Amino acid sequence: MPYFRATVFKSSIRQSRGLLRIPARILAAFPTGFMVHDHYFEHFTGIWRRLLSAGDYSAAETIWQQAFAPVFRWEQANPNKRVHKGTGYYFWGMTALLRGALDRGYLLIHQALEEDKTTHGNISPSTPALALVSLNDSDPRQAFIAWVREQVVFLKDLLGNYTTTRGKSFSWNDFRTRFLSSPPNLDVIFLLTHSVARLMDFKTVEHSLQNPFAGQLEANILFDIALVIDAAIKEKNSTETQFSQHAAFLLKAAGSSLTVGHLTNQIQVALTNNFDATLTEILNGSFRLPGGIALSRFERDVAVAYAIRNRGAHDVSSSSTIWQCFTEIQKALFNVLFGAVDYLY
């Protein structure tokens, strides 16, 4: 550890030890006062920010581990009482995300949200944790709004591809108000935002994505996006259960004559015979239905989503087309998601 970081860390640890003597007194006096509990965790932010400024994310996480230790001990000693830990989990999760630990970061942020739900008695509390995991970029009252705004910029770029290829005026505000702010359920949005974070993380190592293992990881994320699409359409087509039926429902709303039969027979048969070759043909527009019928651009996008959804549910092997054409496939799936909200919501 460089001298400066070591000095900051040691100084911070000395300060944090003093703070760790606080909770027993505070919590005993205010066992249900969540604002006081917030204040306890906020005491650590000064030390935490110094470590962040020094670039020592590992030590910054250690601060939150130390902050939680006496809280957990107090709760174990007082089983009928609880401490509101939403603020602490939020800052800890934020630190993990800055460190690049996406799964741990999102687990901690979601734990913060669960704390907020319990404390406020509301399944959708207006708190920073919910704002982060639901991509609420309109609420500046969150310490990690920069993270949310970066994700919004990423999605707006994909949305621009949708509006350009479809000739639509569908806006980010349309998507936010009609879907992000009122989704089928919060789990759908959580899966979407976590997937977006993973996609953005991939962009930092684009030079390392031309290999079969990259295809496996990419297929996993694309499958999650397909699940979001599935849930989005199912909300408006609740009598059906199959993705092919949901895909056909969306296509009909978009003015297409492509049917479930086309998807499950001609397209699926071709994918089963040669997945990579067929997916490549769908992407480049050379795929033909019997009679030489070509697919429209949106029909191709839906066919790609159908291919990813079916393969992801049954096959873990790598697909060369996925890692070689990942950007095009990603755009296709988001075109379908935006189209689902555009036509159905």
Image (cartoon, rainbow, N blue to C red):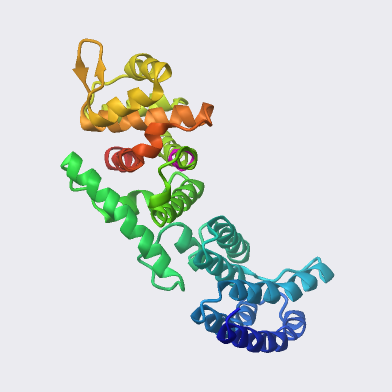
Q: Residue 257 in the image: state x and y as whole percent.
A: 24, 21
- Which of the 4 image quarters holds residue 95? bottom right
Residue 178: % across, % down: 33, 49
Q: Residue furthest left?
A: 167
Q: Nearer the viewer, residue 262 or 202?
A: 202
Residue pictured at 18% horizontal, 45% vertical: 164
Q: Residue at x 59, y 61 (%)?
A: 108
Between residue 135 and residue 267, name the one nearer to us.
Answer: 267
> In which quadrant is the C terminus drawn?
top left
Q: Is residue 287 above or below residue 144?
A: above
Residue 88 visible at all: yes
Query: From the viewer's perspective, is residue 251 above or below residue 5?
Result: above
Q: Quadrant of residue 261?
A: top left
What range is drawn magenta here? Answer: 218-222
Q: Is residue 237 visible?
A: no
Residue 220: x %, y % from top left: 49, 40
Locate residue 293 relative to residue 190 in the image: left or right.
left
State whether the magenta stretch is mostly helix, strand or loop. helix
Residue that extends furthest to the right in the rendered view of this protein: 77
Q: Is residue 166 magenta?
A: no
Measured as percent of width and height from the top left, residue 24 is found at 77, 81
